[in-house]
Amino acid sequence: MPDSNPMTVLNVDDNEQKRYIVTRMLRAEGFNVIEAENGTEALRMAQDQPDLIVLDVKLPDISGFEVCQILKADPETNSIPVLHLSAHYTKSGDRSEGLDRGADAYLTHPVHQQELASTVRALLRMRTAENNAKALYERERRIAETLQRALLLTVPSDTYPGLDVSTFYHPAWEEASIAGDFFDTFALPGGKVALAVGDASGKGLAAAAHTAEVKYALRAILHETPQPDLALSRLNDFLCHSYHTHGYGLELVVALAVAVVDLTAGEVRFASAGAEPPLLLSGGGVSESMTVGGLPLGVYAGVEYSVQTKMLEIGDTILITTDGITEARRNGDFLDYEGFIELAERFQHSPKTKQYGEAIVEEARAFTGGKFQDDVCLLIARRV
């Protein structure tokens, strides 16, 4: 039964007799064939997206090599397979030149119908596989970007009465912005507010999906256990069990810092699992790094995490960041955590946390010469 939607092949040859023979063989094999007799016409017809191009090398206006090179340099046509089909007397070096300049295969006249058809089908299978891979990548990328947008939803700075909160995320590479960095702020029972910044290893859909699991598991656990150290221990056990069940290894570990603010009591509790130490900056300009730490989540079950409790006065500011800022570098020199503290102290008099965070991020970027080497995630909360 004839194919109801045959593949279209563009056959390019200035020799009418050879063009006729090739077209007849391809049509006998079930292909739809269109023809061009010179390079200029071939370039124009290629814009209609044939499935494959059979291209002679010696053309009257533009050589087949040049036509192929132009096609492969054009984003609109570079995925179309090109099969050079040249006369038997072509120089031996022409085959190498054709392939080096972008052709996907090279045959010479006289060619048997079966060889021609098999080569064409093989190239079309390769293109189909490539298109399927691209479609799968685009689908996963769209899903991952949707997930990450949910993970990086910002809230108005005045969402929590008594706190001015701002969050910042800057991917190191715009074309590869899907990573495991995330932040979260949410209300807890008793008028408390949770602040979290995390960095899950990996990129792409797997990292985004894993990060979503971590973020929402943390929310559930903190609602039951609003103590950051105990919450991290429970979350770590949950992740270790999940990794063991699904056969994951250390490629899915998570660095996470959490602060629970209790405005009624005027205090904040900090805990950290392999993350940069949270920073507390007093309204008077005195900075203090929280000496909490522990293994990243997902390494070993049964880990206990430390907690540090501090008073939170009017004007005091909490800063939590990933290592995208502290590992900002220029010519081998790192900004380091001390550099982050210096920036926090320098811009502490910014009237709002939004301007405060923007100043820190931009100054850190300037330190690098304009390009971060890793994704930057920063959360700032000030008691007002």
Image (spheres, rainbow, N blue to C red):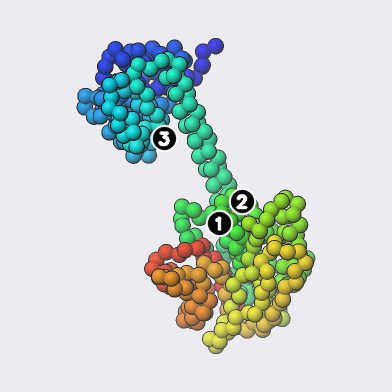
Element on which disc 3 rests: loop
| Residue 159 image offset from top left, x and y in percent | 61, 68
Q: Is residue 23 left or right of residue 203?
A: left
In the rendering, which numbered label is found on residue 179?
Answer: 1
Q: Is residue 94 left or right of residue 336?
A: left
Q: Quadrant of the N terminus?
A: top right
Q: CA distance from mark 2 to mark 1?
A: 9 Å
Tell me the CA gap for discs 2 and 3: 28 Å
Q: Residues within 10 Å of mark 3 (few under 14, many from 20)?
A: some
Residue 55 appearing in the image: yes
* Three-letter code for the amino acid on which mark 1 is drawn: Ala
The amino acid type found where label 3 is placed reads Ser
* Amino acid at dot 2: Ala
Q: Quadrant of residue 93?
A: top left
- The numbered mark at residue 206 is 2
Disc 2 is placed on an element classified as helix
The quadrant where residue 287 appears? bottom right
**Residue at the disc numbered 3:** 79
- SS for dot 1: strand
- Residue 43 vs 265, above or below: the answer is above
Extreme residue toward the front, this view: 92
Q: Earlier in the sequence, mark 2 or mark 1?
A: 1
Residue 286: % across, % down: 55, 87
Q: Which mark is residue 37?
A: none
